[in-house]
Image: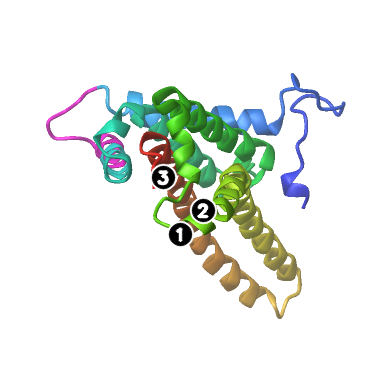
Amino acid sequence: MDQFIVSPLFGDGEVHWYTPTNVTLWMAIGVLCVVLLLVVGTRGRAVIPSRHQSLAELTYGFVHKMVEDVTGKEGLKYFPYIMTLFMFILVANFLGLIPAAFTVTSHIAVTAVLALAVFFGVTILGFVLHGKKFLGLFWVTSAPLALRPILAVIELISYFVRPVSHSIRLAGNLMAGHAVIKVFAGFAVVAWVAPLSVLAITAIYALELLVAFIQAYVFTILTCIYLKDALHPSH
């Protein structure tokens, strides 16, 4: 599990909140990659787009459609934030697949901050837009009256579990995939097992490319679903 250890960039001292680490380095690289793709890659705004511009436009259209389909027209004003989330997670996931790189999204400290930002953001938004009516999210009016208090407790618990599942799903899947690759790489030192180990690593690596995209998509679409609940809280 040494590939997940947070270490300072300079020296071997303790890691404090202000210490530049491998995590901060690869987060900065991720942000730089997003800027290069979405800002630098599209600055020409050519009628016949380049590959970079085409990729940026496809990504923009993909996330825009996702936000509109899930939250409706009202949710499009929050599109920039959701687009930022998607691009950061997607690029961080793909960067983590580079040999000797660091996967920042495999750390619960990173994913928990992203999930808590979504959780508090949509909760505050819900109360700002609807006031006490936002509590209608927990009151299932379609259920029999006797069951509504029980369902309200279940809904309340599930609501506060959201940031936990939101963050652990992303970090757990990324960590598990990289750990499995490391395990199979350990078998490569045995001569007669090495060919099978290389084939297994290649197959898992291809799967991890898919997982990197899927996990960014899942995190983003769950954000859209939570935003929809804030915009339209009644059952």
Q: Which residue does the numbered mark 1 point to in the structure image?
A: 144
Region rendered in magenta: 44-59
What amino acid type is highlighted by mark number 1? Answer: Pro
The numbered dot on residue 177 is: none
**Label 3 SS:** helix
- Please provide percent x and percent y for residue 105: 60, 42
Is disc 2 in contact with disc 3, using a CB cutoff of under 8 Å? no
Q: Is residue 49 left or right of residue 35?
A: left
Q: Residues within 10 Å of mark 3 (few under 14, many from 20)?
A: some
Specify whether 140 is left or right of 24: left
Q: Earlier in the sequence, mark 2 or mark 3?
A: 2
Residue 90 in view of the camera: no
Are the two marked residues, 2 and 1, in contact with CB atoms closer than 8 angstroms? yes
What crowding class fits label 1: few (fewer than 14 Cα within 10 Å), some (14-19), or many (20 or more)?
A: few
Viewer-proximal residue, 213 or 218?
Answer: 218
Q: Identify the residue position indicated by label 2 in the image.
A: 148
Question: Image point 74% across, 27% down: which residue?
Answer: 9
**Residue at the right extreme of this rendering:** 13
Q: Secondary structure at mark 2?
A: helix
**Image coordinates for residue 171, horizontal then vertical, percent:** 62, 48
What separation in Å lies between label 1 and label 3 (alpha carbons)?
25 Å
- Image height check: is 107 above or below 186? above
Q: Nearer the viewer, mark 2 or mark 3?
A: 2
Residue at screen point 31% across, 29% down: 41
Dots 1 and 3: beta carbons under 8 Å? no
Q: Which residue is mark 3?
A: 225
Residue at the front extreme of this rendering = 146
